[in-house]
Image (cartoon, grey):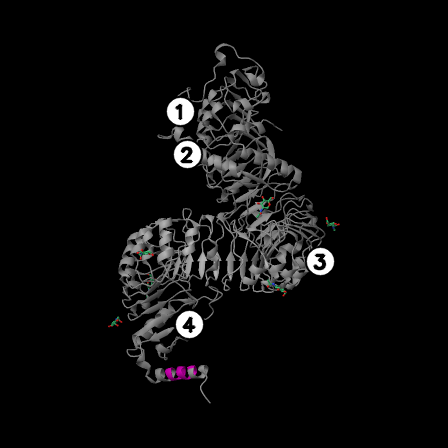
Amino acid sequence: MGFSPISSLSFFLFLFHFHSTISSSDFCALDQSLSLLRFKESFSINSSASVLCQHPKTESWKEGIDCCLWDGITCDLKTGHVTVLDLSCSMLYGTLHSNSTLFSLHHLQKLDLSDNHFNFSHISSRFGQFSNLTHLNLNYSIFAGQVPSEISHLSKLVSLDLSRNYDLSLEPICFDKLVRSLTKLRELDLSNVNMSLVVPSSLMNLSASLSLLKLFGCGLEGKLPSSMGRFKHLKYLDLSINFYLSLEPISFDKIVQNLTKLRHLALDYVNMSLVAPNSLKNLSSSLSYLSLSGCGLQGKFPGNIFLLPNLESLDLSYNKGLTGSFPSSNLSNVLSLLRLSNTRISVYLENDLISNLKSLEYMSLRNCNIIRSDLTLLGNLTQLTLLDLSSNNFTGEIPSSLGYLLQLRSLYLYSNKFRGQVPDFLGSLVNLSNLDLSNNQLVGPFHSQLNTLSNLKYLFLSDNLFNGTIPSFLFALPSLYYLDLHNNNLIGNISELQHNSLRFLDLSNNHLHGTIPSSIFKQENLTVIILASNSKLTGEISTSICKLKSLLVLDLSNNSLSGSIPLCLGNFNNMLSVLHLGMNNLQGTIPSTFSKDNSLEYLNLSGNELEGKISPSIINCTKLEVLDLGNNKIEDAFPNFLETLPKLQILILKSNKLQGFVKGPNAYNSFSKLQIFDVSYNNFSGPLPTRYFNNLEAMMVSDQSMIYLNATNYTSYVYSIKMTWKGVEFEFSKIQSTIRVLDLSSNNFTGEIPKMIGKLIALQQLNLSHNSLTGHIQSSLGILINLESLDLSSNLLTGRIPTQLGGLTFLAILNLSHNQLEGPIPSGEQFNTFDASSFEGNLGLCGSQVLKKCYGDEARSLPPSSFDEGDDSTLFGEGFGWKAVTVGYGCGFVFGVATGYVVFRTKKPSWFLRMVEDKWNLQSKKTKKNAGRYGARRN
Ligand SMILES: *[C@@H]1O[C@H](CO)[C@@H](O)[C@H](O)[C@H]1NC(C)=O
Ligand SMILES: *[C@@H]1O[C@H](CO)[C@@H](O)[C@H](O)[C@H]1NC(C)=O
Ligand SMILES: *[C@@H]1O[C@H](CO)[C@@H](O)[C@H](O)[C@H]1NC(C)=O
Ligand SMILES: *[C@@H]1O[C@H](CO)[C@@H](O)[C@H](O)[C@H]1NC(C)=O
Ligand SMILES: *[C@@H]1O[C@H](CO)[C@@H](O)[C@H](O)[C@H]1NC(C)=O
Ligand SMILES: *[C@@H]1O[C@H](CO)[C@@H](O)[C@H](O)[C@H]1NC(C)=O
């Protein structure tokens, strides 16, 4: 009978154990034992810190047992010194102070504290005292602050890992010291350490014997030097997610040619737009992992890259300029991950290819060029755990062969043109955790197709043609976390929510009826409820809603809810960030209970029957970005206390019964972030609030970031508002951050338009119509080069139209009608596109638009080259001239128009939508030249 490998191993362990026990209890010196025990005592064991780590190694640390036998500790067999301390994943929680007894373990060679929770401790400079340390691992342990330069004293370090901590940063001086002294370093992982001040060239001083370099998400900026080629021993290089790092072709060539041992290369989101994809063809054949997502690669991709014999993982996604075709044969048969989404690389799903991809576990071909495809073949890729074919215009029914993919955990088929019903075979994919079929043309009522999917967590079925009643099994799936059914034709009520796992529920834009079911209020974990625009939900909002202590988003807009707003919504938890109850029949007053520390970012109560005053408690909503109280019956003076809300970007109070002078500001910085200010259709009187204008800093600066305003919490709820845009009221389902609107129309404002209005350079829409404004039209309006809509109609304005307005090249709507203007209408490309309706009711105007000839010196038409009425330098600070303004903001604007400011929610009949969208598309294609033509219409 021979020894099996297992039993010989246990025999060896036994011997070792035996040896250690007999070598007397003082094998581990007493001072080491004490130090370790004190160290242990300085932390608590936190079982909730990590799901994966559930074994606290320090539990075996007890007095009376030789410390060399404790879990996580290795001693030098000769001296008894503790040389290895491995407390990775040990559930430690607490601060690691610099007086910790850890630092008396001078003989340590390897120290691993990774995957614990050191509660934002700074890394003590005393780490530098472990003079014999070869391995230091502080990965993922919630350290914060600066990495101390004393780390560079660890000259024997072979491996250093400070990655994935909370908020560590590394100063250039410290980094330089580190790279110069740690000459033995072979593995360096500083991922997520903020190194934004470190210049990439200083990386070149790192030890040439490096075999692993991971600097993922370090905020590196600048060009990566071409001397990268010196790291000949690199096997693993990851510089991903350094958005401002760029790779010149020459540096990339060096990486490709000189790093012949490379197995793992990840450069996601490093700017490689100048690198020719063809240079990848020389990549080392030992490569098993290549990830170049979002690198800005342009051009034809060499087909042979796919043929690297050892390639297991290939990600070229999000390189929209990448073309070429994926070969169908000779592929490495070890390929397990393939991501080509958002490229123009062609893929032919044919027999040859499929038989070559048998090892594939992860395949994402979202928004690719998939040509001549037989989707039924996908049923042969039985190892797949993730399949993403979204955004590809696939038609027909969802192929039943997908039912063979029993390992699938994620199936994404959204944004195609799949028709038919949700297929029954999906019910056999019992491992599915994510299923996204949204934005297709799937029809029919549900039966119980999916009720076997007990692992399903995320279910997206929105934007289809599902009809019939909402099936009750959906509300009984045991693991369901996220349910999105918005934009379908489902009917019925939702009285049967049964599970407790649900966090996210979006049933908006269906045909639900009845009251909000009380079962919702028992879903303790719900954080997002969107039941907007079902149009038929009736009844009151029960105060039980406030039992949902985790609620972040509550959107019940566009229904027929009545009764009053539950007072508790003002203060029931301090997490609620979105409260949208707009467009209902709610009565009573605005809650007066907004408490301090609340997190509201979006508060929309517009379009109800609310009365009374605006509660000053709203100033407790210090995070508020959007406040829409329009279209109610609020009777109050101007709520100037709102000016103290530091983040307010959108304030809409239109169509109420507000009155009096708009006086203010009383605070420094008031309304400085405001970009939409709409108090139209009220009874405000007195002069225009010029002093507020002076503070509208956001309207003085164009925003070039093309993002939609949304809640900052992780739900990313996109803000919507109803607003008059170029004369027509729209519901904007998304709001570009670039938008700037000032609307004071339909009040009783008197006096002149202040000259300083020209400071609000970023304005796109200015409406002062239907007031009693007098005096001239300010020539400074000509500075507002971003204006697309200018309405000064129905006032008492006199004098000439300033020629400077002719320079507003983006102006699509101009309305100066019904004033007392006189003289010639300025000529200029833009002005020629406006018809008589823009000028009617001004008896003294002449020009072709009003079919009235100008005589004598009236006929002058000056280009908008000078601002003759006074010195405009007073409008701006020094150095803020007209030229600078044009250069600075002009191109951002063009970009803005081309991308489109607004996306309309599909609440409108589709023909209407199409009409509106076509209009916008048209307008964005035509540049400034013709923009006016589409705008001259008013409602
Ligand atoms: C170590 O330092 C911390 C903070 O300076 C202090 O709170 C703690 O009492 C000290 N512990 C010992 C054992 O001296
Ligand atoms: C460090 O290692 C050297 C060489 O192995 C040894 O002589 C020295 O005693 C060690 N120092 C400590 C503090 O363990
Ligand atoms: C990189 O490779 C090229 C050619 O393969 C060679 O000429 C050059 O010396 C190498 N550079 C370094 C730094 O090793
Ligand atoms: C796919 O599977 C079917 C049925 O198991 C088999 O007949 C066919 O040959 C397979 N095709 C490929 C390309 O492997
Ligand atoms: C899908 O069809 C639309 C409209 O025909 C087209 O604009 C889009 O590029 C197509 N998408 C793909 C991935 O082919
Ligand atoms: C659902 O839609 C289909 C196709 O439009 C239609 O034939 C069917 O009658 C509808 N069913 C219900 C319950 O509305």
Q: Residue 425's spot in the image, x, y percent?
A: 66, 61
| Residue bounds of the magenta highlight | 9-16
Residue identifier under label 3:
447
Type of amino acid at the residue the image marks with label 1: Asp
Residue at position x 47%, y 51% in the image: 301
Residue at position x 48%, y 44% in the image: 622
Q: Dot 3 lies on which element?
A: loop
The mark nearer the N terminus, 2 or 4, is 4
Residue identifier under label 1:
872
Q: Dot 1 lies on which element?
A: helix
Q: Dot 2 lies on which element?
A: helix
Tell me where residue 653 sits by quadrant.
top right
Question: How far is mark 2 from mark 3, CA to CA?
Answer: 58 Å
Q: Which mark is residue 57?
A: 4
Mark nearest the camera among 2 and 4 is: 2
The mark nearer the N terminus, 1 or 2, is 1
